[in-house]
Image: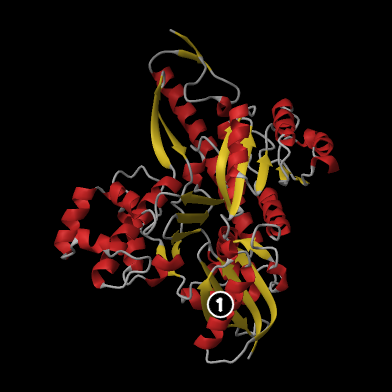
Amino acid sequence: MKVDVLVAEIGSTTTVVNAFKDLNTENPVFWGQGQAPTSVLEGDVRIGLKGAINDLCKNMNEDSIQYDEMLATSSAAGGLKMTVHGLVYDMTAKAAKEAALGAGGIIHYITAGKIRRSDIKKIKEIEPNLILIAGGVDYGNREVALDNAEMIRSMGLNIPVIYAGNIENQEEMELIFDEESGQKLYNVENVYPKIDDLNVEPCRKVIQDAFEDHIIHAPGMEHINDLVTGDIVPTPGAVMQCTTLLNECIGNLIVLDVGGATTDLHSVCEESDAVSRILINPEPKAKRTVEGDLGVYVNRMKVIESIGEEKLRQECQEMGINLNKTLEDYVAIPKTEDEIKLVERLAEEAVLKAVERHAGAIRYIYGPSGRSTIAEGKDLTPVKYIIGTGGALTRLPNREDIMKKILTYDETGLLLFPNDAAKVLVDNDYIMASLGVLSIKYREAAIKLLEKSLNMKFPVKVEETKDARAKVMSEIQRENKIKEDKEEAYRKHIEESKAMGYVVEEEDDPTKISSIPKQLYKR
């Protein structure tokens, strides 16, 4: 049998191979899937890849399979381990963190300010795949990033470095990380070029390129190019790539993946006009968070702790589940009805807590002028679609009901959650990561395959120029209305003052008046 492309998802425990054919036609096909245990820790990734291909052949009743290309995503051998070093935590360090997470990185350590000896010790213990240095707006602070670079150079690590800080430092960075250092340097645009301006996309692209350049040197991965002929992308980065593609097709959305050890949440969403006016810190359009304590297998006890053990016992009693016995027999893939019900409850908690941590909130602050309303964090109120991928949210019987709980979770009205107009979709074929890497070369085919997996027909996209023009005109109309209201309030104020017997010296330009007109009153 001949297929166009095989996409391998090389996980920490399992390697999955998805086969696609007819990619250059109007009807691309997801042909089949095979899996086998990952063999990276055994010293050769090819064993697991070949095992997954053999399983694919068995599942499709074929003796052998030929393919034109093989692409791959990987989270094996610890995934893309990174450390991030910035100047101020809420500014450059946060921007660098967003860039790393969006690219599929697993951040093991973040520092703000100058690196200390204790930081150096931790970096050595972590043995990251990549080090990201940021710091300073363009033409701002230079010293901290340069000092941090010198400290990292002095460690003698053979680890590539990405510099995404003040552009004035780029030449200095090339001198610090020269050939003698043994560390490859990637200079990229500043992730925080101006105050309140995030610029994370260029850095994300370079992170993924650096990952692909260096993954072949990881233990057990040396021979990956013997089978893989195309792109190799971090698995979470591939899901973000797919989420971004979906955003271009259907608008604002979030994608949830509840796993055995972690829960990932990807959002690609513009904040609403109402929230953007009171948002105190910028948020990236595309954002990823990883909750390391929200897993339904490895971290099940932490999820139970989040629910509350007594509360869970009461719920299990109402469902007719013996909690102690079910936990004793607990396995990664639930088999019995009781196990499935328990995993669904744990998945529900993981979903709601992950969204709560990812989303922002409205907050009230009090000052001399009284109460003010501000917004912090990611605004998910404009989200149109909530999409489930991963094992739990594509295979559990009540997966859609679990995600619908998001729409009714916010009882206070202060959380920036999706509203009840959002629709729930499921990646039924469980192929979003594969389609993320596939879309790099076969974009249109990936879109058609997404339509099939999500069981929906994407709307015809309105021309962006029309949307942009409408948005500009709406903003102009809003500003004109504010101006007219100010003028009307000013005129009414003058009339009321004259009626009370005041002599009023009027301002020449009432639009410059703020909430309290600056006039001189004479009795």
Across and down, in percent, residue 225 comes to 72, 69
What quarter of the picture does the C terminus occupy?
top left
Would you say 370 lies left or right of 434 here? left
Q: Give residue 506's position: percent from left, percent from top.
A: 54, 19
Determine which quarter of the picture holds residue 296. bottom left
Q: Can you give x and y, in whole percent of width and height, for residue 350 in the image?
A: 36, 54
Q: Amino acid at mark 1?
A: Ala
In-front residue for pair 512/488: 512
Residue 166 shows in the view: yes
The answer to whether 36 appears left or right of 186 in the picture is left
Instruction: Please state which of residues 113 and 523 is positioned toward the viewer in this rendering.
Output: 113
Q: Nearer the viewer, residue 190 or 421?
A: 190
Q: Nearer the viewer, residue 108 or 41?
A: 41
Q: Position of residue 411 (x, y in %)?
A: 28, 47
Which residue does the numbered mark 1 point to in the structure image? 52
Position of the N terminus, as image quadrant, is bottom right
Relative height, residue 431 to residue 188 (above, below): below
- The colour mode here is secondary structure
Residue at the image position 62 percent from the left and 89 percent from the top? 64
Residue at image position (30%, 55%) is: 408
